[in-house]
Amino acid sequence: MAKWCLPFPWLVILFLAVACGGGKEPATPTLPPADTAQPTAVLQGTPQPTPIIVDGQLESPAVGYGVHIPEGWSASPNFLPGPGFSVDAFFAPDLVEGVQPNISVTCDQIPEGTTLTLEEYSDAKLQAARSVEQVEPDVSSGEVGGQEAVVARYRREKLEPAVEKTEFFFVTEKCGWIITLTVPLGRGSDYQNLFDEFLGSFRLLP
């Protein structure tokens, strides 16, 4: 039985769009410090086919999900394409306290013949969060798209910019999934209903 390993892109995704850009244009991601940054080649890959967006509804048959885009937010499909993973990002229209609130949907592709459990996947991701974010996540259980999920919430106060993150980890036959909300520190409750609606609209496609 093949063993699943933690993909490199996780260390980059953790820093997705927290303090750049303005207006309605997607922000540029802030990369990790030099001791954790991955080679540029990791981010070079073949982008997934462009998803279909109609009336605020995004469908991505190539990745395997659909979701409703929050009103006023912009979608940036294939925000971080690469070998073995894809990240779609959704951005609030404006910066708030130097941070552009965003939601990202990550699919870490599971190689054929590999078995991956939710416990294995979430443990690897939580360990990466502890190392990179320098925090201890508050962990609970949840559900996304009918799938059992592990939920991690944490406040990143030691690194700039200071943010709050809520992450849902779940696993399907095709992907290890992460859905992440990133907002300014102390503003999590302001975006909770929006995030709940986003999660509620998330559905897996055949």
Image: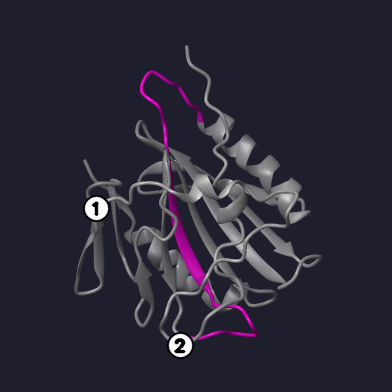
Q: CA distance from mark 1 to mark 2?
A: 26 Å
Segment tinted magenta in the rendering: 94-117
Q: Which residue is mark 1?
A: 49
Q: Quadrant of residue 34?
A: bottom right
Which of disc 2 and disc 1 is earlier in sequence? 2
Mark seen at residue 108: none
Q: Which residue is mark 2?
A: 23
What is the crowding at mark 2: few (fewer than 14 residues within 10 Å), some, or many (at least 20)? few
Q: Amino acid at mark 2?
A: Gly
- 115 relative to 156, above or below: above
Q: Position of residue 137 (x, y in %)?
A: 71, 51
Q: Secondary structure at mark 1?
A: loop
Q: Nearer the viewer, residue 24 or 141?
A: 24
Q: Residue at x 37, y 60 (%)?
A: 200
Q: Nearer the viewer, residue 84 or 119?
A: 84
Q: Quadrant of residue 160?
A: bottom right
Q: Amino acid at mark 1?
A: Pro
Q: Position of residue 184 (x, y in %)?
A: 64, 76
Q: Quadrant of residue 111?
A: top left
Q: Residue at x 59, y 54 (%)?
A: 12
